[in-house]
Amino acid sequence: MKKYLLNGIAALTLGLSITSCMKEFNVEEQREQQALNNAEQALGFRIPEDQAWTMTTKGSINLTIPGNSNETYTVYVYANDPTTDGTAYYLLKQTVKGGDNLVAELEIPDYKKSFVVGIADSDGLISFKYANVKDGVIDTWAEVARTRAIASTRSNQGADYPATSTGINANANEWADPDKEFGGWIVPTPLTDDQKLRVRMYFQANPNLGYQDPELRHFFVQQVYKGGSAQAGSSSENITAANGSVYNSNNMNLLTVGANHQHINNYNAGDCSVSNNVLDNGGNVNDGPYHSDKIMLMVNIDDTSCFGYHETGSSNHHDNKAALVSAATIDAWAAENGNPGEAVTDKWNRSFLGFDLAIAEGEQAYAKDDAGNVIYATYDQAAESPKYAWDGEKIVEIADPTKYYPIEYYDGYKTIMGCGWLTTNTNFYVAADKVTLPQTVSMNRAQASTISTIQNAPVLKDVMVGDTYYQSIINLPRIKQLVENGYLPVKDKSLTEWVKVGKSDGYFTDWIVTLTEGKRQTKSEALIWSYAFEDSNLKSDYDMNDVVIKVQETADQQHLKVTLAAAGCQYDNVVYLGETAIEWQEGVTEVHEAFGVGKGVMVNTGRGVDANPVTITIDKPVNYDPATADWSIVPSGGDSKDQHIGIAETGKNPCGIRIPYDWAWPIERTNICNAYNDFATWAAEVNEATRKDVSDWYERPTSNLVRK
């Protein structure tokens, strides 16, 4: 009897136990359903049963890395575009030899269709390439070059660096200093003399070269060659002015770029200002290699459709006498011609820009018509009688002879008589048969020996006639003589400059510079992942700011920087990684205490107080993956009963979400659906393709409804 009785008691106990477990199970199930109902009511949409609360997909990469097989490169696969953003955030960082394949697994943000890949050499010089992704696999390079694609984003870059022409970044001693606000540029190595020789010989051997827009946004200019009066090879232009001076490439100055002729800052005749505009390279400010090579930096150039120059003696611009040649073209020519000089193809990817000196009729000088008269200024009139006058643009016939006046000057030695007339432009006075001696209020009376010089001048400046000031007196006899001798007036010089025009010879050797794309030292950091939590299963307002942490892998890839960014909670909360509580300070795990505020005080949510984020560094766990890491919080109080609240699982209420971004969280009492318009579309969508199209919702907040 005792045996059966004991068995009966055991059976009863077992039955009660089973019944109790079933009740607990039903309570938990009911509780979970209640939490899900609460989430759907608060968020305003039905949560699909198979909805995954993830924004990335496990993918892979297999790309052949271009470069020298003897060099090891650091390769970055970026989550953003470092060519337009201030900081580059990478999903993957790995070292690969040139010619080898980068093979790895990585988390791919669902919306990405292509990536920028950075390939950094041992000097830190990074080249950027596009890579395509399809079905989670990155295995093809994009055909479009990065420098071409950058054109569409130029307007976005203007805010990053001030244009050199404004003078803000004129001091090039700051170029390479990463601590300067607009420093951090990688300055190209100066060309050697042997490299310059090769470039010069190429241009002197190859006439009639072409030009193609290099589409550079930022670039360095370096002097290569300026022939001056000692021109060599086939380039032999020498243009003699009326005053006897010789025009050659010494007179080519004011290097410009673009259709608006933007002046390349302080690059006058290749002579940069040493004190302000040339990198001192840590050496003597007067004799450093960068000084002697006259390297200049230009930033934020909107138009490189043409380069040109102004020529001494004219403000007219030449933008049709430039040729652009790649380093590879020059080295290929050198290989066929005995390899003169030193190779110019290197990692700097230089282009060489040559100019052809020209003062041609109709370009910088006025042209003549079929009758031999200078267009806009006919000088065939006789100077013996005052029948013509200069009206400020051209010589015209005098309609009113009463405007003819005698002129008399006293130079301190003798009186010089002449005759002339006032013009319709009252700033000019024209001398008819004799040249008068100019005098101004501020000048002493001229010496008699000056008269011969004055008589040979086509235009005399700064003249007082009686009490009347004239900008110029025009010497018609001298002008007539110049025209008869084949001279033409240079444009925009008020007839003060006269040259015999010469057609350019087609050789772009008179002035040669090199253009090198300006690249800043890219600050590459691991992608910041954000983890945001609601600390109540049943009373959540889904502003997702009760606890916000941000986690980033350190440069050594051995540690994690963990940042407590916000605490919009009234309960006490402790952050966990797996089963380990995060200790923000010695003995401090609770988030309010970590911020140094009282319990229940909201921090960095638009209510309560603002405080600096709290960052600590911890060892990175073995096989740590930010996309699957078990981050959670444990609230003390409320309805959670000291249970872990982790990242939302498929189909569950999203009390915790994981975001592959340096995320801005909603302000207090602002539902995430209101702070991010596309969140509801992404979270409620069941069609995977449609969902991926808006899976970057976390990058587009309503700005006044979030904090960061």
Image: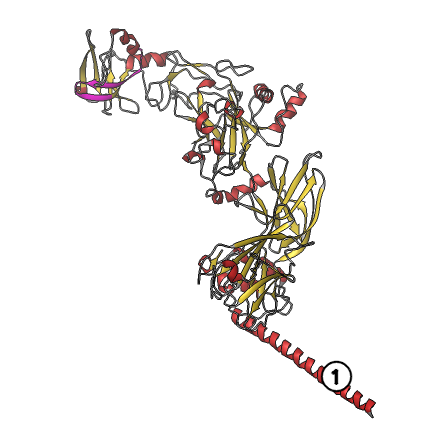
Report the front residue among 642 and 219: 642
The residue carrying pointer 1 sits among few (fewer than 14), some (14 to 19) or many (20 or more) residues within 10 Å by Cα, namely: few
Report the front residue among 363 and 382: 363
Residue 274 x/y as whole percent = 46, 25
Q: Within the magenta stretch, is there residue 133?
A: no
Report the front residue among 539 and 115: 539
Residue 338 x/y as whole percent = 67, 18
Q: Quadrant of the N terminus?
A: bottom right
Residue 655 x/y as whole percent = 57, 66
Instruction: Determine if residue 690 is in view.
Output: no
Q: Residue furthest front?
A: 587
Image-based side of 57 in relation to 219, left or right: right
User: Please, what is the three-letter code of the amino acid marked with disc 1?
Assistant: Leu
Is residue 605 depicted above or below 284 in this figure? below
Is residue 507 depicted above or below 77 in this figure? above
Q: Residue at x 53, y 16 (%)?
A: 235
Figure colour scheme:
secondary structure
Q: Residue at x 44, y 63 (%)?
A: 608
Instruction: Determine if residue 134 is in view.
Output: yes
Report the front residue among 15 and 391: 15
Image-based side of 244 in relation to 430, left or right: right
**Count the marks: how many?**
1
Residue 149 x/y as whole percent = 56, 42
Q: Examine the image and state in which quarter residue 402 appears.
A: top left
Q: Residue furthest bottom?
A: 1
Q: Examine the image and state in which quarter residue 489 appears.
A: top left
Is residue 47 depicted above or below 120 in this figure? below
Which residues are the magenta region? 456-470
Q: Does dot 1 land on a helix, a strand or a loop?
A: helix
Q: Main secondary structure of the magenta part?
A: strand
Name the residue carrying label 1: 14
